Amino acid sequence: MFSIVIPSWNNLPYLQLCVESLRRHSSQAHEIIVHLNEGTDGSLEWVKSQGLKYTRSDKNVGVCLAVNHLFAQASHDWVLYMNDDMVAAPGWDTALLEAIASQPSELVMYFGTLIQPETGGHPNLIKQDFGRSPDTFDEAAFLQHFRADPRGDKNGACSQPTLVHKKWWNMVGGYSLEFSPGMSSDDDLLMKFCVAGCRTFRIVGASRFYHFGCKSTGRIKHNLGGRIFVMKWGITQIEFHRRYLPALANGTATTPDNPSANVRGTWLGKLRRVGYALRYHYPLEDIEAWDPKPGNGQWEQGN
């Protein structure tokens, strides 16, 4: 079985639909753990009434800290991180279990296939509109047509849902808190798995989820993720996705003996680093917009 971790920030209707879909469309009784940022919209009372395992912070601590905390509570080795604005389709977990069985190594990253009303032209997303909110969600149409696109597995990476082995999540340190509240933290995690030696990045075609899209990120002030990434790794995120990740996923990259040599700074990355160092700083308000002052964050957990 999996441990399924879901961060939620006062998003009760979406959270209810997400959890209901997991319960109805899973082949096994997976462990579901929710982190509530604030939970002042009735979410706390609802997770308690459902007997769900949960953690809660009285402030919005961001995705990085919330998901790291959820992973620490997970009982199973394989952990799926998904967002509360996603709906699981039938067969989502059996497809992932088959993917795990097909690989001898635990150092892998698997991703579900997302169906969205708008895809922005992203080739790894399926464009189908089954509603823009829980109130308008057409469940009957979703269950009838979610398999309409015949695509199968694909080498590469996508956003959540993300399935990893807890051992390797802990080995690379999970989400890096310098990316809080979360923009570009996914790319940083991918890079850390690359450095650790991961060469299997697979989007599982039969593991499908409907995604309403960015129902929490639009409410926060974003961190300077792209700048932090290039200052940390010496390459831009575009270079990472266009040059590094495809070569690693397709087995055409050279793997040095020294893991730190997996990432080599590029001229563009070096120029960006110099430019950012000379031109930018990180305003204090970018941090205060999401992070509770030291000593003020109260945490709780249940079940």
Image (cartoon, rainbow, N blue to C red):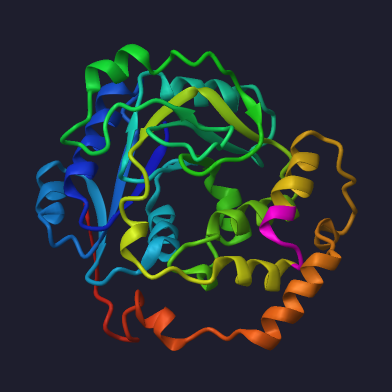
Reply above or below: 275 against 100. below
Image quadrant holding the N terminus, namely top left
Whether residue 196 is visible, yes or no, is no
Picture mark count = 0
Q: Is residue 131 left or right of residue 194?
A: left
| Residue at x 54%, y 73% (from the top left corner) | 178
Q: Is residue 105 left or right of residue 173?
A: right
Whether residue 242 is visible, yes or no, is yes
Reply above or below: 217 against 228. above
In the foreground, 222 or 98: 222
Residue stretch rendered in magenta on the structure: 234-239
Reply above or below: 227 against 73. below
Q: Is residue 251 left or right of residue 53?
A: right
| Residue at x 19%, y 40% (from the top left corner) | 16
Q: Quadrant of residue 248?
A: top right
| Residue at x 9%, y 53% (from the top left corner) | 45
Reply above or below: 99 against 67. above
User: Residue 282 lies in magenta, yes or no?
Assistant: no
In the foreground, 175 or 131: 131
